[in-house]
Amino acid sequence: MDPEPELQVTDFSGSPAAEHRERTARARSEARRRYHTHLAAVFDQHGVTAPEDLADAALDALTVRRYIDSGEVCRCSCHPRLPESDLHDYGFDCVCSRTLAERRRAFDQWHNAIKAFWQSPEDRRITEAEQAAEAKLQAWLADQQGVIVGSHGGLAPEQWTGQVDGHSFYFRERHGEWRIELDLRPSGRFVRTVAGTNNDGSLRYGQRELEDGDVIAEGTTTAVGYGTTPVERAQFIVDTIRVHLDRQACPHYLNDLSAIDALLGADTRWCPACGTRLRTR
């Protein structure tokens, strides 16, 4: 037996995840350039010698942290870091730099543009497509024993709640990463919610207790079977939960499938001892 395990490399260069990494890398590079120029100008105004060099040193000292063993850049959010997207022009056009009148004017322009869009032919096409997708989802759910979807929707984040075979679940996806929590229970933590409006027009608030569950699966939107439609997403969620429940009942290869995978030369989908399904696909 070899003393070291074999390392296998898979090429994901053409995947959506690779494209996301490339966009993020370009954004980081542009943010670095913009803030370097900004800092150098500030240092120059203060009569600093070699402002370009000092700007480089300041950015490195504040925003670059590396692992002491590998030297790779640490991306933990506990460290100050530069923007990783062009939101608000990399921070140079944030709403904090505008007056109240300018913020109101920008909001009115945005609101009017949204209102005009939702009254356009494109709005009707989107609405009809969403209604058709929802009808397909409801038709699919009607044939699923033990599956209840209480709520679903959203883009950032996308969230689903419901039950699968008597187990409550919560699904959340944001920025390409998702997780599924199972068997939700009160957390003891509360959030303030908008409960309505008072007679004088001011908002009335309430409180809702948050629920937590056990995280049984997590990954990215590049996962096989993740899908793009509500029906495909529901199938993905339900299948992932049921595989987890099946694996909980299998005593043979619950924690480590690598040995049997190596013998078969492929991912093991079914337990060879009891026939329990161990993977979605």
Image (cartoon, rainbow, N blue to C red):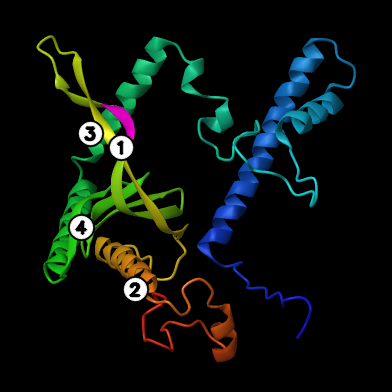
Q: Badge 3: few (under 14), some or many (20 or more) residues near its Cα, within 10 Å?
A: few
For the record, the magenta segment spans 188-192
Sequence order check, earlier mark of 2 and 1: 1
Report how far apart the C-alphas of labels 4 and 2 lie in the structure.
35 Å
Sequence order check, earlier mark of 1 and 3: 3
- The answer to whether residue 54 is above or below residue 279 is above
Residue at 46% from the left image edge and 21% from the top image edge: 95
Q: Badge 4: few (under 14), some or many (20 or more) residues near its Cα, within 10 Å?
A: few
Evaluate if marks 4 and 1 touch, with contact meaning CB atoms under 8 Å apart: no
| Residue wearing tag 4 | 129
The quarter of the picture where residue 73 lies is top right
Q: Nearer the viewer, mark 4 or mark 1?
A: 1
Q: Secondary structure at mark 4?
A: helix
| Residue wearing tag 1 | 210
Sequence order check, earlier mark of 3 and 4: 3
In the drawing, does residue 177 fall left or right of residue 139?
A: right
> What type is the residue that disc 3 sits on?
Lys
| Residue wearing tag 3 | 115
Label at residue 246: 2
Evaluate if marks 3 and 4 touch, with contact meaning CB atoms under 8 Å apart: no
Residue at 30% from the left image edge and 22% from the top image edge: 108
Residue found farthest to the front: 251
- The verdict on residue 202 being magenta is no
> What type is the residue that disc 2 sits on?
Asp
Residue at 24% from the left image edge and 65% from the top image edge: 231
Q: Quadrant of the N terminus?
A: bottom right
Q: Badge 1: few (under 14), some or many (20 or more) residues near its Cα, within 10 Å?
A: few
The quarter of the picture where residue 31 lies is top right
Foreground of the two, 106 or 225: 225
